Image: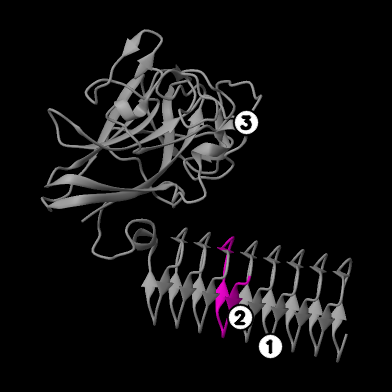
Amino acid sequence: MDGNSTIDRNSTIDGNSTINGNSTIDGNSTMDGNSTMDGNSTMDGNSTMDGNSTIDGNSTIDGNSTIDGNSTIDGNSTMDGNSTMDGNSTIDGNSTIDGNSTIDGNSTIDGNSTIDGNSTIDGNSTIDGNSTIDGNSTIDGNSTIDGNSTMSPVEANCDGEGGWTRVGYLNMTQSGATCPTGLIQQNFTNISHPVCAAGNMGCASTSFSTNGLAYNKVCGQVRGYQFYETQAFKRLRGSGQNRNSLEEFSVDGVSITHGSNPREHIWTYVGGFSEDSTDNRACPCNTGYSGGLDLNATFIGSHYYCESGADPGQSVSGVLYATDPLWDGQQCDDRESTCCPANSKMPWFYRSLDTQTTDDIELRVCSSSKESGVSGVPLDIIELYIK
């Protein structure tokens, strides 16, 4: 330890690690292996540095952040919250990594770049210059973001390009938000904001106008919650049912379509019975699924997401499972882990249509059960874009 460096509380310095200058390590932070902290750098909270990682200059590592492998943080860079750097990743200059962001592989963040929210940078990706990555964006593979680029969540999670027009938006976590026509507002004691639900069994419909704009690509996200029993595709096939038609009730979840007579399928968000279920109420993507449904033989195909909010072994009852939101790709435990692959952009979907259309987009919330005046999977976030 050199200079006026300080180690506070229960911090641990292992191996051949070096702390130079006026650096500070606070809380329960850990430095392992041959890690190095130079200059006036600071590690706060329960942060961890593993392997041969290096923190240079006046850089700051806050919260429960983790630096793994041979990663390097240079200059005045900042990592906040529960952010993670894996492998040989490098953050240069005055870059800022906020929230629960994850930097994987050999990724490089250069200049004054900013990574916000729960963003994920995978593989050998490179973020150059003053680029900004916002929200829950995901940058995969060997992607490169150059110059002063700003990539919004819709660009990052749809096709990586601009030109999108938003036609639908709902965020019930925002003050003053109201449910769209066709859905009813519900309040629960175990969630801090209202949600939008169907009031009866079957489907409740709401539409989003495209204002006559021609499009052949649709992208967006939906977030909901399991309430009581959600039975996935049981009504599509199984238990004597055979309703392989968009015109009839077929899913416990959300059906997004365009057109009428007939409707054309865009995407489906599905609620499974529980994370460890395998019968005809389970998500077909669950490991060991035995419900007898081949979605490739239906109008759904691979254009769906399915999750459950009920933990493995948990008794399903008439409550809102608020601690595990559906379709966010998180907390996919037990048999459900295969429903949330690492390369998924959940909750975002992207669909390229076979033909161009000007149809409005219909969103239906559907349910096979009703309890305490609520049916279906109550929603709190909807975003829909076209181009």
The stretch in magenta equals 88-102
Residue 154 shows in the view: yes
Q: Can you say whether 162 is above or below 233 in the image? A: below
- Secondary structure of the residue carrying numbered label 2: loop
Residue 57's tag is 1
Image coordinates for residue 158, horizontal then vertical, percent = 34, 56
Image coordinates for residue 83, horizontal then vertical, percent = 62, 64
Residue found at x 20% / y 45%: 353
Whether residues under marks 1 and 2 lie with C-beta atoms below 8 angstroms apart, the answer is yes
Q: Earlier in the sequence, mark 1 or mark 3?
A: 1
The amino acid marked with disc number 3 is Asp
Q: Residues within 10 Å of mark 1 (few under 14, many from 20)?
A: some
Residue found at x 18% / y 31%: 263
Residue 95 on the magenta span: yes
54 sits left or right of 261 in the view: right
Residue 169 shows in the view: no
Residue 23 image-quadrant placement:
bottom right
Image coordinates for residue 139, horizontal then vertical, percent = 45, 63
Mark 2 lies on residue: 77
Mark 3 lies on residue: 311
Q: Residues within 10 Å of mark 2 (few under 14, many from 20)?
A: many
Q: Can you say whether 334 is above or below 174 in the image? A: above
Residue found at x 50% / y 83%: 112
